[in-house]
């Protein structure tokens, strides 16, 4: 078990030997009817933590913690080595490793950076997810708080499983204890627990870290804490996996300045006429965003079932109604009565084909109109622009790499017009497409500019900045802090 190296002063104890092998060194924690001690195994020379529990009836139930821990096999949960007893007490001998409680760390706000919050909460979420997946019944921890999260050189450990309970068929818990500040309303009022009970406490822990942080960027995580701590269970994240997905998504946006100012949630793509390349563009954009580690799902909204034809040609893997091919993830048009669950916090790319009127009715963070550049397509392009000009978040794209016509459109409409390169394979990303999408998203400012007619009517050259992914760097946090 991990206990804080700093914080509450330890009570030093001399010359006490338990059961002929555990030399008691100090008292390191107290609870209702129990006290925890740091001891050293005389023969092995190793440190242990011993929780001594009173045999009085109102406290004796705590011995069940040993049975629970004995069934758990996780590197971030303490191991039980032994159980002893005498006339007055039970003794649970557990793993010990030095570290600091999160409660103690939070007193030093300079440590509470955005990266620290993400790394800590993600590790705690991993532990809770492990507990919730135990078979045949999930284990609900019930007592999550900063005092029980220990930060050590090996990362996070979760201690004190004294009131953890296996979930039964009715969702009732074993003991109705816990810390009011972190306790879900349904638990404190009705003595009821579920997976959402731990999710609520995790949200409260996240909220407490954000409020303790001197890093203004940490406020970007508050919407996750707010959703996790909703009063109604059904309005929270349904699983720890959903919570983690939202956390990762937010961090990806925070790490990538392309999406940081105005978070994309919904992108509409429509074409000025049939076969102008709207579907091709939408598939390519979806592939690009997923390649950039921004979770995105294409949705077919046209009646032509183009995606179903592509699926039939092969090369796709299906999972819960979602079809994957490389970095592309999409949903074909299934028809009435079929619903597919989107991944939590995924960007939606909605392909409306030539149905501009319907596309214009949908509120979106970006409305892309794909324009034709062949001679017989130009009149339709002008008519299409007249229908949507003034639309919020409008982005104009001229297809087939015709920079001459893109320049003409831009001059006539006093609008920025991007030029999509001549391209044969929507699922593959060329350097030209990457520069186009990167530049298009970087220039987006949540609306059109006052004077958009500038010298970038076609794609510009934006240096391809390749960064290490966030996940490749978060592991360095603790090593840097604890040196």
Image (cartoon, rainbow, N blue to C red):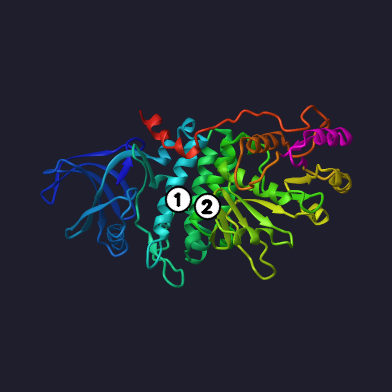
x and y percentages locating residue 230 in the rendered image: 58, 56
- For the residue carrying disc 2, how many other residues have a C-alpha within 10 Å: few (<14), some (14-19), or many (20+)? many
- The answer to whether residue 82 is magenta is no
Q: Secondary structure at mark 1?
A: helix
Q: Which mark is residue 125?
A: 1
Determine the residue positioned at 83% across, 55% down: 357
- In the picture of the structure, the residue carrying the numbered disc 2 is 243
Observer-nearest residue: 209 or 410?
410
Determine the residue positioned at 58% across, 63% down: 321
From where the camera sits, is residue 378 visible?
Answer: yes
Asked if residue 229 lies left or right of residue 472, the reply is right
From where the camera sits, is residue 143 visible?
Answer: no
x and y percentages locating residue 464 in the rendered image: 59, 31
Res. 476 image quadrant: top left
2 and 1 marks in contact (CB < 8 Å): yes
Res. 210 image quadrant: top right
x and y percentages locating residue 298 in the rendered image: 65, 53
Please determine whether, in this image, residue 109 is positioned above or below residue 175.
above
Q: Give the distance between the C-alpha atoms of the residues marked 2 and 1, in whole angstroms.
A: 8 Å
Q: Secondary structure at mark 2?
A: helix
- The answer to whether residue 398 is magenta is yes
Q: Which residues are magenta?
A: 395-420
The quadrant of the picture occupied by the C terminus is top left
x and y percentages locating residue 177 in the rendered image: 42, 59
Res. 5 image quadrant: top left
Residue placed furthest toward the bottom: 169
Please determine whether, in this image, residue 433 is positioned above or below residue 128.
above
- For the residue carrying disc 1, how many other residues have a C-alpha within 10 Å: few (<14), some (14-19), or many (20+)? some
Observer-nearest residue: 154 or 287?
287
Observer-nearest residue: 96 or 36?
96
Q: Earlier in the sequence, mark 2 or mark 1?
A: 1
Determine the residue positioned at 68% across, 36% down: 436
């Amino acid at each position: 078990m991990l206990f804080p190296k700093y914080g509450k002063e330890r009570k030093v104890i001399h010359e006490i030997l338990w059961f002929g092998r555990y030399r008691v060194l100090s008292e390191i924690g107290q609870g209702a009817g129990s006290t925890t001690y740091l001891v050293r195994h005389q023969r092995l020379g190793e440190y242990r933590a011993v929780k001594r529990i009173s045999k009085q009836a109102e406290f004796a139930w705590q011995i069940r913690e040993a049975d629970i821990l004995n069934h758990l096999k996780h590197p971030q949960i303490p191991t039980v080595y032994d159980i002893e007893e005498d006339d007055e007490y039970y003794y649970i001998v557990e793993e010990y490793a030095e570290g600091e409680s999160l409660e103690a760390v939070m007193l030093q706000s300079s440590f509470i950076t955005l990266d620290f919050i993400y790394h800590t909460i993600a590790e705690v979420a991993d532990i809770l997810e492990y507990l919730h997946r135990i078979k045949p019944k999930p284990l609900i921890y019930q007592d999550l708080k900063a005092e029980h999260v220990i930060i050590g050189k090996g990362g996070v450990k979760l201690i004190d499983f004294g009131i953890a309970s296996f979930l039964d068929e009715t969702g009732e818990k074993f003991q109705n204890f816990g810390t009011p500040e972190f306790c879900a309303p349904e638990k404190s009022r009705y003595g009821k627990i579920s997976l959402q009970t731990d999710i609520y406490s995790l949200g409260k822990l996240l909220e407490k870290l954000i409020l303790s942080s001197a890093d203004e960027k940490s406020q970007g995580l508050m919407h996750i804490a707010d959703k996790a701590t909703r009063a109604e269970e059904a309005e929270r994240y349904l699983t720890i996996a959903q919570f983690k997905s939202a956390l990762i998504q937010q961090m990806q946006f925070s790490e990538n300045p392309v999406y940081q100012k105005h978070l994309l949630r919904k992108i509409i793509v429509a074409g000025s006429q049939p076969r102008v390349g709207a579907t091709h563009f939408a598939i390519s954009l979806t592939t690009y965003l997923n390649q950039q580690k921004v979770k995105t799902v294409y949705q077919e909204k046209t009646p032509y079932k183009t995606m179903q034809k592509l699926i039939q040609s092969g090369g796709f893997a299906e999972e819960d109604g979602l079809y994957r091919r490389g970095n592309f993830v999409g949903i074909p048009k299934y028809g009435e009565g079929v619903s597919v669950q989107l991944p939590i916090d995924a960007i939606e790319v909605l392909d409306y084909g030539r149905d501009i009127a319907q596309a214009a009715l949908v509120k979106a963070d970006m409305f892309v109109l794909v324009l034709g550049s062949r001679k017989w397509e130009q009149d339709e392009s002008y008519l299409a622009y007249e229908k949507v000009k003034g639309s919020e978040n409008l982005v104009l794209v001229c297809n087939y790499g015709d920079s001459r016509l893109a320049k003409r459109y831009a001059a006539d409409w006093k609008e920025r017009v991007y030029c999509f390169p001549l391209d044969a394979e929507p699922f593959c990303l060329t350097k030209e497409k990457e520069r186009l999408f990167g530049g298009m998203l970087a220039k987006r400012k949540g609306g059109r500019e006052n004077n958009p007619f500038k010298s970038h009517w076609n794609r510009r050259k934006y240096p391809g900045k390749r960064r290490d992914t966030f996940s490749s760097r978060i592991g360095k946090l603790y090593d840097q802090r604890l040196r």
